[in-house]
Structures are given as C-alpha cells and as structure tokens.
Image (cartoon, coloured by chain):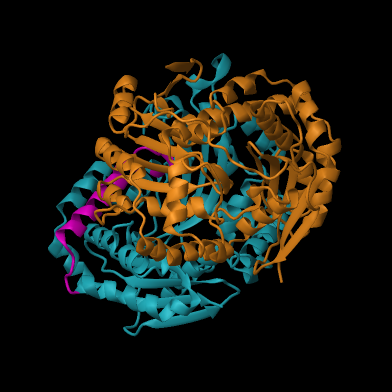
C-alpha cells in the first residue's frame, strides 16, 4: 500500500492496487459523519474506437454510448432499478459521464455498507434487453434537448471544435438524437465487457473509515477476475495546429457569451505544474485584481470575474476562458494581447499563490469534493496531493516560461453565442 | 456555532428588510455598490488583494427573498487559522473586512461614489434584461410571478428597469442609511468562537423585525399561462397551493410527489412514459406553495400534463403506500443529516429558523418529520390545489 501524507494540511491518502488491477484510494476523515464513495471506469465519450479484447476486433461505436451505458447500468435483472434502491436507503446516489470517464457514486451519513452492497452489485451486473434499451431513448433525448437550450454547453463544444478538427473531445458527451438512435443492447454489452474490467477502474472512498477494513469490505464484494493489460484505444492522429480561429452561433440570449481557447502544445512539462502556472497567469493578468479586469469592468464590458479552466487528457490539452459581454470581440483582442505581452510582478505572483493554496486546501473540506477530485485526477494518472506541494514550489520563472509558450495570440480561438 | 469539522470558517451577516415593490431595485443595488469599495478598501482591486492575501478568502454578497422578507446576505469564508503557514491568523481580519464593506462604505457628502453607482445601475439593467437567458430559471420565476400577482412574493428579486433612472448616488445613500438603522441584523459565525471575535455591538443589538402580513389566497380557477421563446425543449411549471399548517406533513407530501427518483412524478413521467429527463417538485415553505418543474418535448405537452395531474389526484384519493411514505421520510431525514456537513447550509437553516421564530435545531426538526403519519399526508393531499400552469414553448 502506498501512503502519502501532508502534515501541513493534516491529510493522509492510502492507495492500494488489488490483484485484479483495480486501484482503491482511501482518504480517511475524522470528525465527519458524511461518507462518500465513487467508482469510475476509464471510459468516456472520447473512447469511441477500440480493440475488443475478447475478439481482438476493431470496433467503432456511435457517439454518446458511454453516457447511454451509464443510464442503463442501474437496471437490474429482477426488475429493480438500483438508483431507486439506493435512494430508498436515504443515500444521495448518482452517476455521470465525462469525456474520459464514467462514475457511479453515493454520499450518505447512514447505511453505507448496504449502499456498498448495492453499488458493487449493480456495476458488476449489467442487464440490457431490447426493451429496456429502447425505453431509455426518450429520456436521454430529453437530456440532450435540455443541453441544446443551454448556451454554455454550445459555447464550450464550439470552442473545442475550433481547437481540434477530428479529436474525439469535439463529440457531444451524450451524443445527438441521431447518433443514439443506433445504440443497441449489443453495443452496450461490447462496451461494458471491454471497459468495465477492474483493471480499468478506480474506486475512491472518503469518510470516517479504518483503511484496512474498508479495503477488505471492497475486495469481498468483487467478482473474481484476472488482471488484464491496458485496453487498446484508437485515436485520430495528433493535430499539430488549431482547426479554426472563430465560430459564432445565434441563440435566444440577451447578453452575448464568449469563450476563448488556447491549445497547449507544450511537451515534456508536468501537467500539475502547467495547471498551477495557468491559474496564476490568468489570475495575475485578467483576474479580479488585475488592471485589465478593472478597466473592462469600469467600461461596462464585463460584469463579473471571467472563468478559467485548464482541461487535459492523454490526447488533448487546452485552456478555456469565458464570460459574457456586449462586445466579445473587443474583449478577445484585449485579453489575448495582455496575456501575451503583460508581465507578472513578484507581488502579484506571491498573492496568487496564496489564493491558490487556500483554494486547494478548501477542497479537503468535504468528502464529496475529495472523492471526485481524487477520481478525476487519478483517471489522468495524477496524484492530487502533488498540487499542494507544487503550488509551494513553483517559481515566477517557471510561470513565465509556460506563459511564453502557451499564451500566443495567433494560436488562440474565439467562440461566441450571439443574440438575435 | 462552534466546530472543528471544517478546514474553513464562515461568517455571514444578514440584513432583513420588508419585501416591497417600491424598494426592491434599491435593495438589489446596495450589495453591488457596497462590494465595489469601502472606506478602508477603496476599490475592487484593494478588496481583491486583501482577500488573496488572506489565502484566497472568499467573499460574496447578494439578494434573496423568503416569505415576505427581502434578505441582503454578505459572507466571507476563510481557511481556519490552524491551516495557515507560518502561524498567521485571518479570522479577526475577515470579520473586520466584512464589517467594513457593509457598514463603512466609500461615501462623502452623504453620497455613494458616483461612478460606482452609475456602473452598477448599468450592470443591474443588463442582469434584468438577461433574465430570460436561462430558460428553466425564467420559467420558474414567471410561474411564481403569476401565482403572486397581488402579493410581494411575485416581485422579481433583482428589481425593475423602470426604477433605475430615479436612483442616484445620493438618494441610494440616504436609503442605505435608513435601512442600516431600521433593519434586523443577524451575524452567524461558524467554526469561530464568537468570544474570540470583537464586533461593533452598537449596531448589532438592534432587532426591528417587521411583522409578517398574510397574503390573500387566489381564485379557484386554474390560471393557464403560455409564453413563447426560442426553445428546443418546452419548460413546464405547475404551481400548487398548499395549506399553511402542518408544514412537516407538506414536506412529506412534496417528497412523495416529486422528491427524488422514487417519487410519483419521476416514476410515472420519466420512467414509465419516458417523457422527461428531469422532473421533480419543490416546496417553498415560507409561502405555502409547491412547484413542479420539468422539461419535455414540445409535442408532449398534453400528455405530460395529464400524467402530472393524475399523480396529484392519486395522492388526493389516498393512493399512497406505506413504502412510498417511508422512502420519502428517509429522503428528508438523510438530507437533514447532510445539512450538518455544510457550513453554508447550516448557517442558512439557523437563520431561517430564527427569522420565522421556529427556533428548531436540525435534530428537533427531524423528530417532527419522524412523527408524521400517512393520514396527515393524505389530509394535506386533499387540500393541495393547482393554482397556475405555466408553459414556455416555441
């Protein structure tokens, strides 16, 4: 078992790799009644082309299949739906799908072990029939249409479509009404059998637990399976440049919304360091305390702090900056120019670092945040605790180097949702 | 409230005002002007830098409505002193800062800063104009507006554009002085020992809670409202009237009808008929109404409405199983237990209980829920009536 301790923030993380290849991460928390468990598989909307291990056949699946599978996992052979069983126990149960993983989870104060029984049972026992797969199509169709009415989602998907041409990150996570019409029980079983193997899965648990005991409880509930090699996934070729500079779409909004994107072409640099550096750069140059923000705010061009996000995986890495403004193009010009040319002072750097430290420690306030953070980081092969070390170690010189290589105006894209 | 559970502390200050059409726009403007700068921290950069220096302390403020009150809430969340490097401390500093922003604004000659007021009026105008951008929220607010046409609760909490031109830096300041004098002020600390923090007692000791006035009940006929917007999915909201008494039984009624995946609405509208992805109901306790919220394909309006009405009628005729009752009770009990795990929720619960003079702890509240019988829930079901059906369509 691997143990990582951070004395400063008083947290310990235990990681165990089981014989079947599954990784279990335990973050014990005293003084809390809340317990959280999240079980994820490295299977998301990006994984639409792969080699099926049992048949060795190359398979392409319709867009939205990981999400469809997530919906159908709850259905049980005895006619019960595990989501209702969990909710009836008073557990706050849910599931979600992203571009690189699917996760099943619950939070509770009581009935944890009953919930664990149910969770580990349904995730290991798929039950798909033509009828139950068909029934879900209408429900997911309404989930897709709900997203269609959300400007933020369109804004995001259009931005990544500017940054990449064929990369699967450009796929709608839930698919479209058209693509999901091709999903059958056979598609679901093929994906389940490929990706829901313990070697491809990670479980994170946080709450007042005794580490050895909880790991034994998990092992007891696992079906016997042998460790397998890494699943072979097929991705389109690396795209060495952005796809297009600009995209706009008209929707029924009063205030236009914009998102600026930068591809990260930087190789051989730790993602943790880049992530921290990017947050510091954005905070210093266009964050709430920057003169650029102040100027834009006083002119009435923006109304609130912009959102920054660094999104990355094995085959994509980019920065997204978004907000609302009546003059999105003017904002774009100003921001991209400042990010390229403005220098960061030592004082701004130190202050941003303090803020980031505070935000990282605050994540450890809630077992739910902890579980989600450890799962999504470890899916990407990252140890979450390293962020706290790195934020204390990073120098202004490191930050400047990353700034010069990534924030190049020519390499940026702009997506806008316009009003009528 | 003292505890060592969290890595952070939170301080919240609530100003309670009457909810009135005449003053709502000024109320909405006050937090946004105050947050621009105080006598000590003159602009957003100075406030922002101070927050970042306090290890990313988080400050926010805003406006809300509950019952017949309008609440201005200001809060600050900081790391507990024990997690700060080099033995630094921030809890007193954060209290001082919050206090300064609210009670020591940047002002001279009995006026707020002219530029700040001008810019914040402009921002507020944009917020009001953009209220339709989030279609689901808009439909929800519109249904409430329709239900409370003759009651202050129908007021849009961010105010009205036509009021803005009359507001300037001096009359807003005058109004601010007046409310600071008259309003009820509550301070709730979590994670910090109140004795270790010094506050300005002179302001704090006032308590001039306005008396709740009773709202009139609406007409018997169902109010049907359809509105058009450029939507792909139709947003359907039903507003129901619930009795004033036995709010714990109404909570259970609401949970059985539309709280979570085991509810009648989720089971029948989503699972059996595949008509919706999200469907549920929400009980607005302080105004005795329940709202049913869903998004459906445009062509399914009649069908969805029929199934929803069926569920309400099922409950009226007493078709509620013991299993449904117990599952819903469990849902409420668990969410009450979960409240204790979030500082923000604990503070809101405490404030609400004090404001409406119920003064229950979370555990006492749980006991009340435990005691509700099936008969009481059916009794409620027979009194619940549909008041408004609001539909946002293409």
Q: In the rendered image, which quarter is residue B127 located in?
A: bottom right
Give the farthest residue toward the bottom.
Answer: B221
Q: Which of A199 and B83 is in front in this view?
A: A199
Residue A125, image x and y in percent? Answer: 33, 45
Report the residue at 75% width, 23% height from top.
A398
Q: Which of A314 and B68 is in front in this view?
A: A314
Task: Tell me the magenta residue range.
Answer: B317-345
Q: Colour of chain B?
A: cyan
Eyeballing the image, is A394 above or below A55?
above
Is B37 positioned to the left or the right of B277 in the image? right
Q: Can residue A401 be seen in this view?
A: yes
Inspect the magenta stretch and tell me whether residue A363 lies in it.
no
Residue A246, image x and y in percent? Answer: 79, 56
Chain letter corresponding to the colour orange: A
Residue B182, image x and y in percent? Answer: 47, 53
Report the residue at 32% width, 28% height from top.
A219
Inspect the magenta stretch and tell me whether residue B337 lies in it.
yes
Report the residue at 52% width, 41% height from top.
A56
Is B372 positioned to the left or the right of A120 in the image? left
Count of picture labels: 0
Q: Which of B155 and A350 is in front in this view?
A: A350
Q: Is residue B23 visible?
A: no
Report the residue at 17% width, 50% height from top.
B370
């Amino acid at each position: 078992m691997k143990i990582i301790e951070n004395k400063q923030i008083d947290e310990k993380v235990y990681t165990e790799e089981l014989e079947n290849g599954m990784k279990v991460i335990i973050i014990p928390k005293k003084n809390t009644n809340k317990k959280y468990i999240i079980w994820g598989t490295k299977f998301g909307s990006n994984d639409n082309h792969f080699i099926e291990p049992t048949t060795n056949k190359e398979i392409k699946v319709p867009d939205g299949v990981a999400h469809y599978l997530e919906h159908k996992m709850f259905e049980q052979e005895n006619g019960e739906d595990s989501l209702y069983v969990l909710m009836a126990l008073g557990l706050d149960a849910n599931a979600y799908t992203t571009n690189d993983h699917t996760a099943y989870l619950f939070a509770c104060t009581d009935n944890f072990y009953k919930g664990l029984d149910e969770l580990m049972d349904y995730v290991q026992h798929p039950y798909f029939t033509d009828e139950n797969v068909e029934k879900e199509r209408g429900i997911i169709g309404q989930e897709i249409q709900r997203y269609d009415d959300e400007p933020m989602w369109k804004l995001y998907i259009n931005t990544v479509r500017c940054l990449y041409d064929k990369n699967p990150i450009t796929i709608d996570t839930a698919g479209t009404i058209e693509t999901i019409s091709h999903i059958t029980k056979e598609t679901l079983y093929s994906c389940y059998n490929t990706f829901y193997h313990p070697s491809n899965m990670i479980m994170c648990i946080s709450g007042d637990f005794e580490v050895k005991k909880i790991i034994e409880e998990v092992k007891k509930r696992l079906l016997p399976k042998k460790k397998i090699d890494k699943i072979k996934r097929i991705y389109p070729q690396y795209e060495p440049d952005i796809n297009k500079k600009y995209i706009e779409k008209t929707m029924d909004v009063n205030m236009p919304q914009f998102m600026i994107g930068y591809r990260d072409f930087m190789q051989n640099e730790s993602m943790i360091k880049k992530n921290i550096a990017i947050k510091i750069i954005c905070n210093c140059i266009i964050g709430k305390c920057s003169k650029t923000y102040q100027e834009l705010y006083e002119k009435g061009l923006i109304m609130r702090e912009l959102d920054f996000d660094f999104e990355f995986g094995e085959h994509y890495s980019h920065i997204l900056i978004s907000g609302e403004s009546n003059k999105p193009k003017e904002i774009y010009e100003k921001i991209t120019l400042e990010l390229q040319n403005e220098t960061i002072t030592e004082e701004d750097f130190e202050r941003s670092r303090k803020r980031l430290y505070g935000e990282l420690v605050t994540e450890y306030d809630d077992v739910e945040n902890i579980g989600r953070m450890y799962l999504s980081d470890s899916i990407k092969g990252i140890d979450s605790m390293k962020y706290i070390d790195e934020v204390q170690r990073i120098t202004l010189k490191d930050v400047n180097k990353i700034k010069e290589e990534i924030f190049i105006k020519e390499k940026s894209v702009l997506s806008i949702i316009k009003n009528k | 409230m003292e505890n060592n559970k969290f890595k952070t502390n939170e301080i919240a200050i609530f100003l309670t005002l009457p909810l009135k059409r005449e003053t709502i726009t000024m109320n909405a403007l006050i937090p946004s002007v105050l947050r621009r700068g105080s006598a000590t921290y003159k602009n957003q950069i100075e406030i922002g830098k101070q927050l970042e220096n306090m290890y990313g302390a988080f400050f926010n403020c805003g406006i809300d409505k509950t019952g017949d009150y309008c609440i201005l809430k200001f809060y600050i969340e900081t790391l507990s002193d024990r997690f700060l490097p080099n033995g630094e401390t921030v809890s007193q500093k954060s209290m001082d800062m919050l206090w300064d922003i609210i009670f020591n604004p940047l002002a001279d000659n009995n006026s707020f800063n002219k530029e700040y007021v001008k810019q914040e009026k402009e921002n507020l105008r944009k917020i009001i104009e953009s209220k339709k951008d989030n279609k689901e929220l808009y439909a929800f607010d519109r249904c409430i507006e329709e239900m409370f046409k003759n009651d202050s609760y129908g007021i849009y909490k961010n105010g009205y554009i036509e009021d803005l031109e009359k507001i300037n830096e001096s009359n807003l300041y005058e109004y601010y002085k007046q409310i600071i004098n008259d309003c009820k002020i509550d301070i709730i600390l979590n994670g910090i020992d109140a004795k270790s923090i010094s506050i300005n007692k002179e302001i704090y000791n006032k308590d001039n809670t306005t008396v709740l006035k009773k709202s009139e009940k609406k007409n018997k006929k169902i109010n049907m409202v359809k509105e058009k917007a450029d939507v792909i999915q139709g947003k359907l909201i039903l507003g129901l009237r619930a009795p004033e008494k036995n709010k714990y039984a109404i909570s259970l009624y609401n949970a059985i009808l539309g709280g979570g995946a085991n509810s009648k609405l989720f089971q029948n509208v989503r699972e059996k008929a595949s008509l919706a992805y999200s469907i549920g109901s929400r009980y607005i306790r302080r105004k005795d109404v329940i709202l049913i919220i869903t998004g459906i394909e445009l062509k399914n309006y009649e069908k969805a409405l029929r199934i929803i009405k069926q569920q309400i009628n099922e409950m009226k005729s007493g078709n509620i199983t013991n299993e449904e009752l117990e599952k819903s009770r469990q849902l409420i009990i668990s969410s009450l237990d979960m409240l204790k795990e979030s500082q923000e929720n604990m503070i809101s619960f405490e404030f609400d209980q004090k404001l409406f003079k119920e003064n229950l702890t979370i555990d006492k509240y749980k006991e009340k829920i435990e005691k509700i019988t099936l008969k009481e829930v059916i009794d409620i079901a027979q009194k619940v009536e549909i008041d408004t059906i609001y539909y946002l369509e293409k």
